[in-house]
Image (spheres, grey):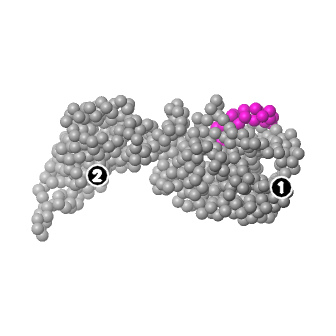
Amino acid sequence: MNKKNVNKTPELSVKVYKQVSLTGERMRRAADANLLLKFRVFLRDRPGSLAAFSSLIADCCGNISFFHYDRSVDSSRVVVEVRMNGQHDLDSLLMAMKAKKYAFERVAGVKDEVEITTPANILEIKVRLVNRPGTLAAFARLLKKHHANVIYMLYDEDIDAESANIAMAVKEPGEIDNLLHAINSEGYYYRVIYRGSGKAEIEHIIGLKLVEKFFIRLRKLLSDSDTKEVKALVESSQELSDDLVQFYAEAGNNLEAADVFEKVLTLASLSRSSVGRRFSAVEMPPLPLGKRVTLFGFRLPTSENIYVFQHDGELTMIDAGYGIYYDDIKKLFKGKKWDLSRIKRIFITHADADHAGTSGYFADEFGTQVFMHHAGKDVIAGDNRSFGHTGKLSKLNKYYTRLVNRFTNCRFPRKARYFRSSVLGSAGAFNVIDRVLIGDLQFEVLESRGGHVPGNVFFLNREYGLLFTADYLLNIKSLTEEDRNALNVYKYLLISPNSNGPLFKEEMAALQELVKEIDAKVKKQGRSALIFPGHGEYYPLEQAR
């Protein structure tokens, strides 16, 4: 059998075919009764929509020969092919769909809701359906009766004329047993492919929106109440909701990189459950640096580090942590008997939320001066950590930046100060663009070449062999298993969230060579070069080998 296009109705965006039969070398046109109508229609994503639509087709004597709906791709679009009994029935169906105001083009302004946040409510079956008008409508009405919302369906009579794959979501997990009992009582033959109690990975569940998969994964890390808080945060802001939807739309085009972004995004959401009584920080061993300076390091609940120099009656910080930890960081510092008004400066390695998120709070409350690379200004203003890049991950970076900043209550300073940009010298493969004093210690500000994020800097003290490396040369061994799993550090080092993966690897190698060079020099004073990463404890060069 072949199909021949005989008409297209522009107003309704439908295609009408007549079937033909091949007999030997001759093509014989079938009777007028064998009309096929193929079109796409946009239905409301709610229980009963399929029942109403398929019943309308059955009422016009149409028999569905192909039906495809995948809520994970488009929550309202259905592609359908209907076999009609002649022109009269075809006209009746088209008029009925117009009367019911079915949309043949996407309706603008319809919000993409997040409705499923647990796999326990999902059922997928393969069910036998007799190939005749009204069969699908009858089954859809049964699903509606049990408040089951279809999230995926594929029926194709050319593949299997009497079976359909259907995935659905119910309101309560207990309703799955009731629904299966009803399906069985009505005499339908079916096979369960997946139900909420199954162990299948969430990635393999069809019909789920990527946004919903995000929240389901989040439930593994957060309590129900914390997951609901994040969900409420998203839903309270149309802009934030749109960002999350767009993030996953872009992620679909960059699956490998998106896997890493998603884990870091999940980690950012995890920060919301690690505040107040649940906040804890790992304090690294204090490091005296001469008579005037002592260096303290703290690893926050989501693995990022903040460093504090105590010197000359003042406190100077390198990096500041997620904004959501601001009150907890203040409490931590007060526990050290520190006067927070003495926090005069914060030096930011780069404008990611986990390194700069509290800097604006300190600036607002205590007048702390915040220093960063001038390119950080563009990252902040553009709300995009890959500002200026035009690669395939640029849009993904944009939505990633906006989401993480909002999830973690990031606040950048209203008026930052910027390191100088003139080249004063070099340190290995990196330009020295500025020098700063912390007590009597001089630090060179090294300019990254942009592998991780625009405006990234490193801080180098040659006297003691101290190198602050931001998100390079991380101390993976010192991270907890939870930190490693959430951050996915090993993969993180190879793929984005780095703006330029190959360049990032080159910079990693260059930093390692620089540390070796510095270590050789301080060895003459009986010291060892120390690496202070943005995640994990500080460590000597020997530990990196």
The spot of residue 220 in percent (x, y) is: 50, 38
- Tell me, yes or no, whether the highlighted magenta stretch contains residue 107: no
- Quarter that holds the N terminus: bottom left
Marks 2/1: CA–CA distance: 78 Å
Q: Is residue 405 above or below residue 16?
A: above
The spot of residue 112 in percent (x, y) is: 44, 42
Q: Is residue 101 above or below residue 11?
A: above
Mark 2 or 1: in front is: 1
Q: Residue at x 85, y 57 (%)?
A: 525
- Tell me, yes or no, whether the highlighted magenta stretch contains residue 337: yes
Q: Secondary structure at mark 2?
A: strand
Residue 443 lies left or right of residue 154; in this view the side is right
Q: Residue at x 48, y 49 (%)?
A: 248
- Residue 39 got which mark? 2
Amino acid at pointer 1? Gly
Q: Quadrant of residue 444?
A: bottom right
Q: Is residue 195 above or below residue 487?
A: above
Q: Residue at x 82, y 45 (%)?
A: 288
Q: Quadrant of residue 97?
A: top left
The outermost residue toward the bottom is: 25
